[in-house]
Amino acid sequence: MIRKLLFAAILTQSALLLASPTIKKADPPNWYLGRGNPMLLLYGEDLANAHVTTTSVSARIRRTESSANGHYLFVWLEITPAAKPGNIPLTIKTPSGETTVQFPIANHRPINDGMAGLAPSDVIYLLMPDRFADGDPANNDPAISKGNYDRSKPKAYHGGDIKGVRDHLSYLHDLGVTTVWMTPIVDNDNTPGYDGYHGYGAIDLYGVEEHYGTLDDVKALVADAHHQGMKVFFDWVANHTGPRHPWVADPPSPTWFHGSVQKHQSPSYEFPPITDIHALPAEQDHIRNGWFADILADLNQDDPHVAEYLTENAIWWIEETGADGYRLDTFPYVPRSFWSAWHKSLHDVFPRLDTIGENYNGDPTVVSFFLGGRSILGYDTGLNTAFDFPLMYAIRDVVSKHASATKITDVLRRDWLYPHPERLVTFLGNHDMDRILTAAGGDRQALKNAFSLLLTERGIPQLYYGDEIAMAGGADPDNRRDFPGGFPGDTNNAFTTSGRTPEQQEVYAYVQKLLKLRHDHQALTSGKQWNLFADETAYAFLRENGADRVLVGFNNANTPRTLKLNGREFPFLAVKAFELLQGAGNASRTADEISLEIAPHSVTLWLAK
Ligand SMILES: [Ca+2]
Ligand SMILES: [Ca+2]
């Protein structure tokens, strides 16, 4: 909102003839030196047959193209070698008059100021800004979107915002989190009653949702996070826009979307046929081109203007804020050819930046198909890593449904499918499924066992806000309850030790200790993983980084278990003793044998010395 006003303020209407042509908005609103030649999408009236000129030495007009109805004008700029930071005046002349707008360009951000990607030691925390903490009650019910705030309604805005995240970075830091991933913060639908609180219904890909704050708030959050040694990942959606994005009723080009509101393919969420070279092309098109939930307008990334728009948008958010990477929504529903070129453009300017794909499927052959690092079907997607849905399902089934522990090793056995299995983002749950505690029937010990496995297995873990304080919640939106202590009038403040209930503190302290162990032991973050034993009710593995070795024993049975491991086998040859790190089990060794005694329904961690 604020950004739009700023842009309006720098318009200089020469107004030779009243009311035409007019420019209401420019995407992107500004650009950077050294970041390529931007394509501007101008929104306005009477823009058909426009001729664009500039007096600036910083830019040259490469070409222009207007929509048939005169509502949109594309302007391709070439930034010249002589370019300097400042405003580029663009004069738009049509048969009915002319107007001049100023387009700002600035120096790009120093290459080490953010854009840092993921490291093996990182721990990601997913939060929904609306549901984490209300740092500014003044933005709870903004005039432009009045009536969408109601804490008693699970699908209304609850008042959480960017300031609330800023205010609680130290809570996350103390827990051991290094990286914050927020669900989308872009401007969402203002229609009364629309459930835009989740952020996935964009109406402006360059705006910040007014319930969350301003672009300055976002910049301040990223700067504060970096100051505390933390990173920020944005949630970015290439597949679709919200149903009330202005483009939906009035597209900038005839091929902007796959179809229209009136005529489009229905959605299919069963995307594995995309990974099947024997599937019929029509079936694949149906998956890629269908409208999500039958209402989210499916962008056509094969339209070169759409592709250029989306690529610039991704570069703009990173340049503007210094954020460290993207979580990429609905990754498989967008063509590999687009992702390949998009990643190349992004990595050319931000070589350290990482992307995490939402390849929502439990089959490693499906998840791995979309990963970058190798060419499949003619394209390397460039995707840096992906969420490990297969391992998530396996851990959930084992800890909450007493499935065989071999389910976990069966997933890990397929790690050869991934270019970098150690960089997969592992997790127990997210905003699209019931909470792990609820899936486990409210069993806090099962929750703790799940955390023990998550934070010791290979991969870069992601926590879902509130799981660390044993929050409960069923399917969406019950899994998106407000974090206790983040909102006015909360009597339970789980952000502080003294404010937490004994049950919250029990799980919080357990997770914090695990994260401290990860921090202290490189074996857990970058060590080799050796799976030593797995059967119906038990699982043991070792993480090894040189002399740093952490042994993990999991007993999922209701009776004590003693696991016998071969002591003469690599990697136990050099191990002489075991030091208890967490849990209550007992480990001992003879020349031939390692013996692990593990209490029922628990996980024990030892340092193998
Ligand atoms: Ca607020
Ligand atoms: Ca699509």
Image (cartoon, rainbow, N blue to C red):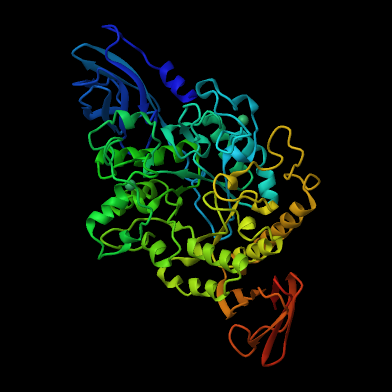
With respect to residue 38, does 603 lie above or below?
below
From this view, report whether residue 143 is shown above or below residue 122: above
Q: Residue at x 40, y 55 (%)?
A: 383
Comparing 444 with 331, the one in front is 444
**Image point 60% across, 27% down: which residue?**
140
**Residue in the image at 50% along x and 30% along y:** 193
Q: Is residue 254 visible?
A: yes
Looking at the image, residue 342 lies above or below residue 530: above
- x and y percentages locating residue 465 in the rendered image: 62, 48
| Residue 529 falls left or right of residue 417 | right
Image check: 424 left or right of 309?
right
Quadrant of the image containing the C terminus: bottom right
Report the front residue among 161 and 490. 490
Say if 533 sits above or below 25 in the image.
below
**Nearer the observer, 375 or 480:** 480
Residue found at the far bottom of this picture = 592
Which percent across, then down, holds residue 325? 48, 48
